[in-house]
Amino acid sequence: MNPAGGDAQGEGVTRGPSRPEPQVHRATELLRGLTEATDLFRESLQEDLTVNATDLAAMQHLLTSGPIAPTGLSRLLGISTTATTTAIDRLVDLGHVTREPHPSDRRSILVVPSETSRARAFELMIPVLAELEAVLADFSDEEQAAITAYLERAADVYRHHAQRSE
C-alpha cells in the first residue's frame, strides 16, 4: 500500500480529510510507553496469580484497603453486586480471599485477602517498587519535584477526560 492510501496498481482508497497530528513532547511519548509497560506488568501479574483483570483489581483494593464488605468492593470496582459476587467466588476458589463474618455486624461478611495471596502479591510487587524508587533517587530534589508535578498534572488530565465520558 502506498502512503496515499491506494495499492500498488493505483486503485485509491477513499479517506476523509486528514487531521494534522498533534506535536507531542518526548515526555508525553514516554508516558504512553510507561502506560503500555504498566499494562504488560498488570497482565504478567494476572498470569502469575491466575486471575482476570476484575479479580486483580479486586485484589489490589483488598491489599491496599484491607477487608471490605462485598457491596463496598462492588462500588470500588464499579461493577454490579452480581458481578462482584462472581469475582469473589473465583478468588475464594483460587485461595486468594476468604469470606469472614463482619466483627460488628452479624448479618454482614467481609472479603479478606489470604496471607498466602498477600505474600505472593507483595513478592511480585516489591522488587518493582524498589527499583522505581531507586530510579527516582538518581534525580535531584528539584528534578524529582518536576517529575512529580508533571505526573500529577498528567494524571489529572486523564481523570478529567475519564469523568467527561461517564
Image (cartoon, rainbow, N blue to C red):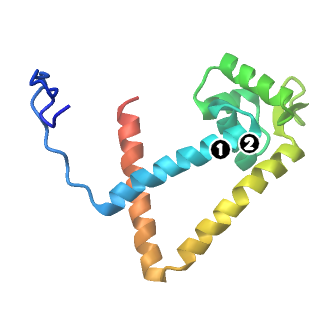
Which residue is tagged 1?
44
Q: Is residue 116 left or right of residue 21?
A: right
Instruction: Point out the image quarter for the C terminus.
Output: top left
Of all residues, the one furthest to the top in this rendering is: 82
Q: Is residue 95 visible?
A: yes
Of all residues, the one furthest to the front in this rendering is: 9
Instruction: Point out the image quarter for the N terminus.
Output: top left
Question: Is residue 145 positioned above or below 61 on the image?
Answer: below
Amino acid identity at mark 1: Ser
Q: Residues within 10 Å of mark 2 (few under 14, many from 20)?
A: few
Query: Marks 2 and 1: in contact by CB < 8 Å?
Result: yes
Q: Secondary structure at mark 2?
A: helix
Q: Residues within 10 Å of mark 1 (few under 14, many from 20)?
A: few
Distance, label 1 to label 2, CA atoms, is 6 Å
Which residue is tagged 2?
48
Q: Position of residue 108 (x, y in %)?
A: 83, 26
Q: Position of residue 141 (x, y in %)?
A: 48, 81
The residue shown at (83%, 38%) is 112
Q: Is residue 28 left or right of residue 113?
A: left
Amino acid identity at mark 2: Asp
| Mark number, residue 55 | none
Q: Quadrant of residue 31?
A: bottom left
Question: Is residue 80 positioned above or below 114 on the image?
Answer: above
The residue shown at (82%, 37%) is 96
Between 165 and 119, the residue placed more toward the observer is 119
Question: Is residue 25 positioned above or below 134 on the image?
Answer: above
Q: Position of residue 71 (x, y in %)?
A: 70, 27
Q: Position of residue 132 (x, y in %)?
A: 59, 66
The residue shown at (76%, 31%) is 69
